[in-house]
Amino acid sequence: MSDLFPRGGLNPASKYFTGTSYFSALSEDQVQIFNVTFEPGCRNFWHIHHASKGGGQILLCTQGRGWYQEWGKEARELHPGDVVNIPPEVKHWHGAAKDSEFVHIAVEVPGEDYSTEWCESVSDEEYFRLP
Ligand code: MN
């Protein structure tokens, strides 16, 4: 399937991802918007988008099949057209399904004192339990 937005190069945050992902910045002004492509089996580490006011992230799913999971909750399966609102201060991960590439657009919701804290990886044991 052809890409809707540019796939870009290897993700500069790859050290916080398991597997291979690609990254392109679609907007760097006003609101930061990134296109992220995950190869099958690729997912990011557990992480938290911190902000003292506003903040968080919105995912717009465009291709393939993927997952989103918040700490302590069941994983949510994602398909093109799905929208995920990630509140600030919620530990979570997102990525591809084990048998499918996955692409989402990530909208970084503007906030005060915005930062992303990277935590532990999503273990193979918990990841490969997902269908
Ligand atoms: Mn996130």
Image: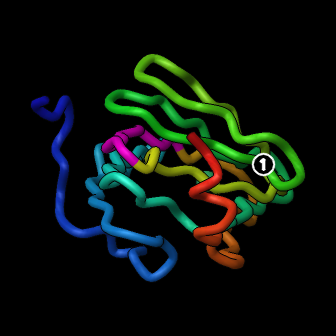
Residue name at image x 36 percent, y 50 percent: 36
- Up the image or down, 67 lies above or below 124; here it is above
- The spot of residue 9 in percent (x, y) is 18, 64
Camera-side residue of 65 and 2:
65
Q: Report which residue position mark 1 lands on.
A: 70
Is 100 one of the magenta-colored residues? yes
Secondary structure of the residue carrying tag 1 is strand
Magenta-tinted stretch? 99-107
| Quarter holding residue 109 | top right
Query: Which quadrant is the C terminus positioned in?
Result: top right
Residue farthest to the top, as pictured: 81
Residue name at image x 71 percent, y 41 percent: 75
Coloration mode? rainbow
Camera-side residue of 100 and 34:
100
Is 1 on the left or on the right of 74, as rendered?
left
- The spot of residue 61 in percent (x, y) is 44, 30
Residue farthest to the bottom, as pictured: 15
| Quarter holding residue 57 | top right
